[in-house]
Every structure is written in structure tokens, then in C-alpha cells.
């Protein structure tokens, strides 16, 4: 092999080595470039996951986190007749105002109301908000009160009827008359109460009757007090309550000069206010009291044992039937007793008539016997009672 051929072979080998090194270098660069975005992507995913965990609830739907309900609602909690907002940075107290019919006032009274309102505006040293809420007229509680009173009248009426049977059994005419008059009064009252109850139910069933409730919203920011970082949460609540209560009382006194009565809402009333605000349509058919009585906030639901419930209903039915049977038995026993006494009275009257047979004419005697035989139970007993009264006198 000549020298030229050896040099050509070496050159080819060198060129192949250069190409191999170039290929390896390109491969390594591509691999490095592809690896770096992947790591960045993983870091981004971790950060976004951590961020989601802090802003979403534990509940997920189709693998996607759902925002907490507190993010939708504009308040955090209700405590001590106050609404807590913005993670404790704002406290709100609400006052319900019951106004006066301005159009029915005289000119002097209108001027007094206007001056009172001007005085309110001049004495304000803090911001307030006016809020008007329109609701369907709810007379459920009023109807329940009427039903309770009607049931009480029915119970007293039933007791009077029992006393009347006892008085008749004792042949106490005076007491019988008094109880009868009292029963008539109670029956009239019961009829009137039922008519009012039916009328109220009719009004309540009309969903077109609306009422407007007016509220004054008074806010307080704990930052107004100064540095609150050294105070606990309970102490901050006490400070906010004290300040808001003072402001509310000042507004209340100013409203009185304008003939407007103010009332600070309790925690339960605040819940009802917010419930209606967030559930305008549902609140008309499903009130807050119904929602609370349904115990939807409980972790599990319980019910009365079926057998115990059946026993209770059976006992109630037995007691009810027993009371009815006693009442009927007393009435029947009273009728039987009255009939037996009336029979004895007639026999005694026949004997007396026979004693006077020879002293009166025969037609008169026959008519007397016929009248005695045809006398009713009440007539016979009334005559007996008259004779007793005569003997007492």
C-alpha cells in the first residue's frame, strides 16, 4: 500500500469520527432542550395544584374542584347579632325600621317627621345603608295562634257540656241554666273564631299580597380601632359589638324623633333575612322555619321507631274512644235515670189523683189521669222540682 492510500484511509476515518461526534452532539443538545420544558411544566402543575387546593372545596365533580359556597356568599359568619364579612375585617349590624303613614299625618306632624329625619342625618358620624326587601305576606304563625286558641275554646266547650250533663243528673236547674247560657256564649265565640281563622287562611293563600320591610345597615371596621393584631378573635368581636350597638342605639333615638321605630335584628332574624335574600323564589313556599325543622344540617337523620309510633297512635285512639264512650254512657244513664224517676212521679201522681177521685167530678178525674199519662219526662221532673222548692220554702 502506498503512502497516498494510507493517508486517504486516515482521512476517511477522521471524517467519520467527526460526523459521529457531530451526530452525538446534536442528539445530546436535542435531548437537553426537550427535558427542560418538561421539568418546568411539572413545576407549574405543582404550583397550580397547590393554588387550587387553597381556593377550592374538597368536593370535586368529574375531577374538577368546586369553589366553596363561602366564595359565592358575601359574608363569613353570623355571631352576636352581627354579620362578619371579609375574614373579620368588617362587622355589620342591621336594624329593622317600622315607619309611619306619612300621607295620613297633619301638616304639623309632617314637619315634625321631616325635622326628625334632618336631625338623624346631622347626627350621623358614620356611613349607613338603606335596604328594602319585598316578601310575600306570611301569616303562618298567626294562623297557628288562631288554631291554638280555637282548640282551647273547643276544649272548654266540651268541659262545659260535661258539666251540663252532671247538673242535669243532679236536677240543679239553676246551675243547668247558667251552664247552658255559658255554652251558648262559647259556641258564638267559637263560630266567630272559626270565621276569623278561615278569613286569615284565605288571605295567606293569596300570593299576590306583598309587604315591604325596610332595614338600616350599620357597618364597623375593626381597623378603625387601631392595631388589632394583639387582640384575639373573641376580643375583636366584643369590640365590634360594643361599637355597633352604640351606633345602633344612637340611630334608634334619632329615628324616634321622626316617628320611626327601630329594632336591632337578632342572629336568627339575620339568618332569615339572608335566607330570603339568597332564596327569593324558594322562600315563598319553603320558609326558613321549615328548613330548620327538617334537620337538613344534621349528619344523619333519625325517625321514631315504627312500632312505638303505632303504639302511641293506638293509645291516643283508645283514649279518644274511651272519652266518647264515657260521654255517651253518662248521657244514656242520665236519660234512663230521668225516665225511671219520671215513671215514679207519674205513679205517685196517679195515687194522689185517686185520693181525690170522690171529691172531683168524673170528667175532671179522667182528664187528670190522661194528662198524667201523657206527661213527658221533662214535665214530670219539672213538677217534681217545683214541689221540692215549695217544701224547702
Image: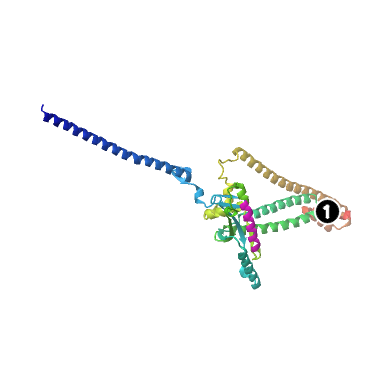
Task: Quarter of the image for the C terminus: give it.
Answer: bottom right
Choose top left, top right, bottom left or bottom right for residue 4. top left
Q: Position of residue 338 (x, y in %)?
A: 78, 49
Does residue 374 appear anywhere in the picture?
no
Q: Name the residue at the front extreme.
A: 3
Q: Position of residue 332 (x, y in %)?
A: 73, 47
Q: Is residue 283 magenta?
A: no
Does residue 342 appear anywhere in the picture?
yes
Crowding around mark 1 (Cα neighbors within 10 Å: few <14, some 14 to 19, many 20+) is: some
Looking at this view, is 30 or 131 the one in front? 30
Q: Kindly state the secondary structure of the residue where label 1 is placed.
A: helix
Q: Which residue is mark 1?
A: 385
Looking at this view, is 84 or 111 the one in front? 84
Q: Position of residue 20 (x, y in %)?
A: 22, 34
Q: Name the residue at the left extreme.
A: 2
Indicate whether 159 appears above or below 24: below
Q: Is residue 248 magenta?
A: yes
Q: What residue do we see at 66% from left, 43% from top?
A: 316
Please name the predominant secondary structure of the magenta segment in the image. helix
Q: Tell me which segment is drawn in magenta.
A: 239-254
Q: Is residue 39 left or right of residue 320?
A: left
Amino acid at each position: 500500500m502506498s503512502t497516498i492510500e494510507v493517508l486517504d484511509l486516515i482521512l476517511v476515518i477522521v471524517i467519520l469520527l467527526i460526523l459521529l461526534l457531530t451526530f452525538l452532539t446534536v442528539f445530546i443538545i436535542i435531548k437537553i432542550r426537550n427535558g427542560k420544558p418538561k421539568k418546568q411544566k411539572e413545576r407549574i402543575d405543582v404550583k397550580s395544584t397547590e393554588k387550587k387546593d387553597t381556593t377550592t372545596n374538597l368536593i370535586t365533580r368529574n375531577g374538577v374542584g368546586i369553589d366553596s359556597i363561602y366564595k359565592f356568599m358575601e359574608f363569613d359568619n353570623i355571631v352576636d347579632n352581627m354579620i362578619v364579612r371579609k375574614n373579620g375585617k368588617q362587622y355589620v349590624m342591621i336594624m329593622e325600621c317600622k315607619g309611619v303613614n306619612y300621607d295620613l299625618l297633619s301638616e304639623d306632624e309632617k314637619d315634625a317627621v321631616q325635622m326628625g329625619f334632618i336631625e338623624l342625618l346631622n347626627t350621623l358620624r358614620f356611613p349607613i345603608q338603606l335596604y328594602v326587601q319585598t316578601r310575600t305576606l306570611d301569616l303562618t304563625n298567626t294562623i297557628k295562634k288562631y288554631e291554638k286558641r280555637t282548640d282551647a275554646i273547643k276544649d272548654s266547650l266540651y268541659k262545659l257540656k260535661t258539666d251540663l250533663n252532671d247538673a242535669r243528673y243532679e236536677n240543679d236547674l239553676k246551675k243547668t241554666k247558667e251552664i247552658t247560657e255559658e255554652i251558648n256564649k262559647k259556641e258564638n265565640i267559637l263560630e266567630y273564631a272559626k270565621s276569623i281563622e278561615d278569613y286569615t287562611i284565605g288571605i295567606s293563600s293569596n300570593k299576590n299580597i306583598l309587604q315591604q320591610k325596610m332595614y338600616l345597615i350599620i357597618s364597623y371596621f375593626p381597623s378603625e380601632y387601631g392595631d388589632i393584631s394583639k387582640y384575639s378573635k373573641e376580643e375583636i368581636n366584643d369590640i365590634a359589638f360594643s361599637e355597633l350597638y352604640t351606633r345602633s342605639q344612637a340611630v334608634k333615638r334619632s329615628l324616634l324623633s321622626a316617628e320611626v321605630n327601630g329594632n336591632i335584628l337578632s342572629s336568627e332574624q339575620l339568618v332569615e333575612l339572608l335566607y330570603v335574600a339568597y332564596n327569593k323564589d324558594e322562600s315563598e313556599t319553603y320558609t326558613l322555619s321549615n328548613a330548620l325543622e327538617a334537620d337538613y344540617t344534621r349528619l344523619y337523620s333519625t325517625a321514631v321507631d315504627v312500632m312505638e309510633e303505632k303504639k302511641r297512635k293506638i293509645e291516643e285512639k283508645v283514649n279518644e274512644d274511651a272519652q266518647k264512650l264515657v260521654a255517651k254512657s253518662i248521657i244514656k244513664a242520665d236519660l234512663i235515670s230521668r225516665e225511671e224517676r219520671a215513671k215514679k212521679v207519674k205513679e205517685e201522681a196517679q195515687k194522689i189523683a185517686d185520693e181525690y177521685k170522690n171529691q172531683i167530678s168524673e170528667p175532671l178525674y179522667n182528664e187528670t189521669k190522661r194528662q198524667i199519662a201523657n206527661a213527658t219526662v221533662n214535665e214530670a221532673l219539672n213538677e217534681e222540682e217545683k214541689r221540692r222548692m215549695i217544701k224547702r220554702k
